[in-house]
Image: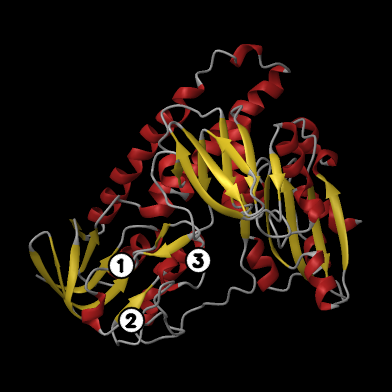
């Protein structure tokens, strides 16, 4: 069977790569060896956010009724079971969209016979172009062995049938703190261990204050500069051993922030150069072998779903030999914690470190009119300006931050000024009016 394009992987990068290729009239085959949707849609990013969204609704309901009495009968043991039922629909939606676009789907293990010959499910597929979008998988630090039972990753934790009493999370990164936010809100006693100097490094501390306040209120223990030597289990309990000899025990140990690439079988037969951490690509996302591309997490450029989506969408331009946009200087990002933190551009700590002149204005979400109507208690919108009032950064900590500032990279990329903000209209009442209010200060 011959196709113009062969896509390996159905996560965000592979999904959008397949759609963009069919839109250009190419015949496309997509092979998925594991779960349809990959980490981004099925096993990681989206299901975690779905679970956190459910928790936000629960917490908001308690606030509206000024009591949790009406909600104490909620069975938390069903929390992830119901979440998993919802996420199974993702697989069907993905396959439906791909088939409607004309993509031919294959499921099962496969391997390369050569650069342009791939075998899967007993079928030989030949192609002009290969797009490797196999992503990454969770791994563990040296000295720790995953057992899928008590020493686990996001894959297993999202399929729990019961909520553990205690949890140790290794990694004070975004993934670790998102899970700490979720499980502590579920009543789990959570301890986060981070070997670095800071929890959630690379962020202004006051932006993170509402997140840390929530974690503290929910009883989370945060320990930085704490290095784990090993982890294991004794019966039904897990433990971690620290370099200082201390042992900590919990129901489960969750490993976060560690990834390794999913390298296709037979990749050696293609001549593609790869390492233990990624498949290197050039500015056009092409490997060292002409006609073989690597998009998304597997190329090691950025481990974010939105960059994987963009690479998938623009891969057709690369196939045609054109330059594609890979400028991540204004990369928007979000932490789906409780509450969220999101934005793009520079933060204060960066400008101080680089000795760049700047000024900031911050506006409390509680002081917006929408904040009043929604009974918002905390959170801020911060605008960071270069001399001359060009926007250097825009950040928000609070409710719906990821939604309100989803376009923030565009603002930074277009070098929007304070006057640009003031001369434009904002829908009233919205939390986003805090941008206008801040600019007017």
Which mark, by number, is residue 319? Answer: 2
Q: Determine the secondary structure under disc 1.
A: helix
Q: Nearer the viewer, residue 256 or 125?
A: 256
Q: Nearer the viewer, residue 209 or 169?
A: 169
> Which image quadrant for residue 59?
top right
- Gap in Å between the C-alphas at discs 1 and 2? 13 Å
- In this figure, which residue is indicated by the disc labeled 1? 23
Residue located 32% across and 63% down the image: 19
Quarter of the picture holding the C terminus: bottom right
Does residue 131 lie above or below 262 as drawn? Answer: below
Residue located 7% across and 61% down the image: 122
- Gap in Å between the C-alphas at discs 3 and 1? 20 Å
Crowd tier of the residue under label 3, counting other residues whose Cα lies within 10 Å: few below 14, some 14–19, many 20 or above: many
Residue 419, position as x, y percentages in the image: 83, 67
Does residue 269 lie above or below 178 as drawn? Answer: below
- In this figure, which residue is indicated by the disc labeled 3? 307
Does residue 40 lie above or below 284 as drawn? Answer: above
Residue 389, position as x, y percentages in the image: 85, 71
Q: Nearer the viewer, residue 298 or 362?
A: 298
């Amino acid at each position: 069977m011959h196709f113009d394009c062969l896509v390996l992987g159905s996560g965000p990068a592979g999904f959008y790569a397949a759609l963009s290729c069919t839109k250009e009239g190419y015949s496309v085959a997509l092979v998925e060896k594991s779960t349809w949707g990959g980490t981004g849609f099925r096993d990681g990013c989206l299901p975690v956010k779905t679970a956190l969204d459910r928790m936000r609704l629960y917490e908001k309901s308690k606030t509206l009724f000024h009591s949790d009495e009406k909600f104490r009968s909620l069975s938390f043991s069903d929390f992830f079971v119901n979440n998993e039922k919802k996420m199974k629909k993702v697989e069907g939606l993905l396959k439906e969209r791909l088939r409607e676009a004309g993509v031919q789907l294959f499921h099962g293990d496969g391997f390369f016979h050569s650069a342009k010959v791939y075998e899967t499910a007993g079928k030989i597929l030949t192609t002009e172009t290969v797009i490797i979008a196999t992503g990454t998988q969770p791994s563990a630090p040296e000295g720790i062995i995953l057992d899928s039972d008590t020493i686990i990753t996001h894959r297993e934790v999202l399929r729990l049938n019961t909520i553990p009493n205690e949890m140790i999370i290794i990694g004070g990164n975004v993934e670790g703190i998102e899970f700490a936010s979720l499980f502590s809100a579920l009543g789990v006693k959570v301890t986060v261990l981070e070997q670095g100097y800071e929890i959630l490094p690379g962020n202004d501390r006051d932006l993170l204050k509402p997140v840390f306040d929530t974690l503290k209120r929910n009883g989370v223990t945060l320990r930085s500069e704490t290095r784990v030597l090993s982890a294991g289990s004794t019966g039904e309990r897990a433990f971690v051993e620290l370099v200082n000899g201390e042992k900590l025990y919990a129901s489960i140990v969750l490993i976060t922030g560690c990834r390794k690439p999913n390298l296709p079988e037979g990749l050696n037969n293609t001549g593609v150069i790869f390492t233990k951490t990624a498949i290197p690509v050039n500015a056009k996302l092409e490997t060292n072998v002409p006609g073989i591309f690597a998009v998304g997490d597997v190329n090691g450029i950025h481990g974010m779903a939105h960059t994987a989506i963009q690479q998938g969408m623009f891969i057709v331009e690369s196939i045609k030999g054109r330059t594609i946009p890979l400028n991540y200087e204004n990369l928007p990002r979000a932490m789906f914690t409780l509450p969220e933190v999101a934005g793009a551009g520079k933060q204060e700590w960066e400008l101080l470190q680089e000795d760049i002149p700047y000024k900031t204005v911050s506006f409390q979400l509680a002081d917006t009119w929408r904040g009043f109507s929604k009974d918002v208690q905390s959170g801020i919108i911060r605008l960071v300006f270069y001399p001359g009032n060009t926007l250097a950064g825009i950040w928000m900590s609070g409710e719906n931050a990821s939604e309100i500032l989803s376009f923030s990279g565009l603002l930074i990329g277009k070098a929007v000024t304070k006057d640009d903000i003031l001369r434009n209209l904002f829908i009233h009442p919205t939390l986003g009016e805090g941008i206008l209010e801040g600019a007017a200060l």
